Image (cartoon, rainbow, N blue to C red):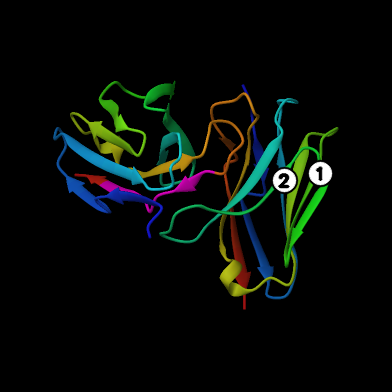
Amino acid sequence: DTAVSQTPKYLVTQMGNDKSIKCEQNLGHDTMYWYKQDSKKFLKIMFSYNNKELIINETVPNRFSPKSPDKAHLNLHINSLELGDSAVYFCASSLRQGTDTQYFGPGTRLTVL
Amino acid sequence: GENVEQHPSTLSVQEGDSAVIKCTYSDSASNYFPWYKQELGKRPQLIIDIRSNVGEKKDQRIAVTLNKTAKHFSLHITETQPEDSAVYFCAASRNTGNQFYFGTGTSLTVIP
């Protein structure tokens, strides 16, 4: 069974479009995250949700809006896509905040043309 | 907040040699230090972790050491194999924290 899944795996779109990435975990975890990994491989946290509540909102343009309909899902919606948004986006989850292991999804490679 | 530095950024070793990757952290309250391996095109996956009540932990060819006084921890891979080639990330977090603070990654290449 897939623990943390994301869809789609690849996303190619034009500048200015709006797109969403979905994430689901079947581990029963309370906390979920979104990371952005750029071409230099840096893993930068974007958002963290705990029990559907936003905990972390790093310096991310407000074009990015996370939504957590329930503990098992954390979706990422991006408005007015820009070239600089091209990256791999990883969803992750952990049992609780703090010092529990984070399990990553397979990633979504977003390419903005 | 926490600041995690990781060195080196790239590392090449001959198959069978050892590889060492070092990280330093700034927050003395950090007490959990995981290491993740990311193969090309894949997701980061936990390979080993250590908590602050332990100085060293081993799992087959992989070991992690922690020096709380100096605030640094290291990943040691012995008898390296080509399949060890990947990007390795260290991280630090604490019980009352909300996130992992990741290092900038080390690209390890094992030359057959």
Residue under mark 1: which chain is it in? B
Q: Position of residue A29 (x, y in %)?
A: 45, 39
Quadrant assignment for the C terminus of chain B: bottom right
Mark identifier at residue A67: none
Q: Is residue A59 visible?
A: no
Q: Position of residue A39 (x, y in %)?
A: 41, 47
Left or right of A29 in this view: B90: right
- Report if the CB atoms under discs 1 and 2 are less than 8 Å apart: yes
Name the residue: 60% across, 40% down: B103
Left or right of A90 in this view: B13: right
Q: Residues within 10 Å of mark 2 (few under 14, many from 20)?
A: many
Name the residue: 49% across, 42% down: A42
Residue under mark 2: which chain is it in? B
Place residue A35 in its image quadrant.
Answer: top left
Q: Position of residue B12 (x, y in %)?
A: 65, 64
> What residue range appears in magenta?
A102-110
Which residue does the numbered mark 1 point to in the structure image?
B54
Which residue does the numbered mark 2 point to in the structure image?
B50
Name the residue: 37% across, 27% down: A52
Compared with B15, A32 (above or below) is above
Q: Which amino acid, by three-letter code, is at mark 1?
A: Val
Left or right of A79 in this view: B56: right
In terms of depth relative to the viewer, which is nearer, B111 or B95?
Answer: B95
Q: Which amino acid, by three-letter code, is at mark 2?
A: Ile
Name the residue: 34% across, 51% down: A5
Q: At numbered mark 2, what does the secondary structure look like: helix, strand or loop?
A: strand
Extreme-front residue of the structure: A28
Q: How many numbered circles does the render carry?
A: 2
Compared with B7, A81 (above or below) is above
Q: At numbered mark 1, what does the secondary structure look like: helix, strand or loop?
A: loop
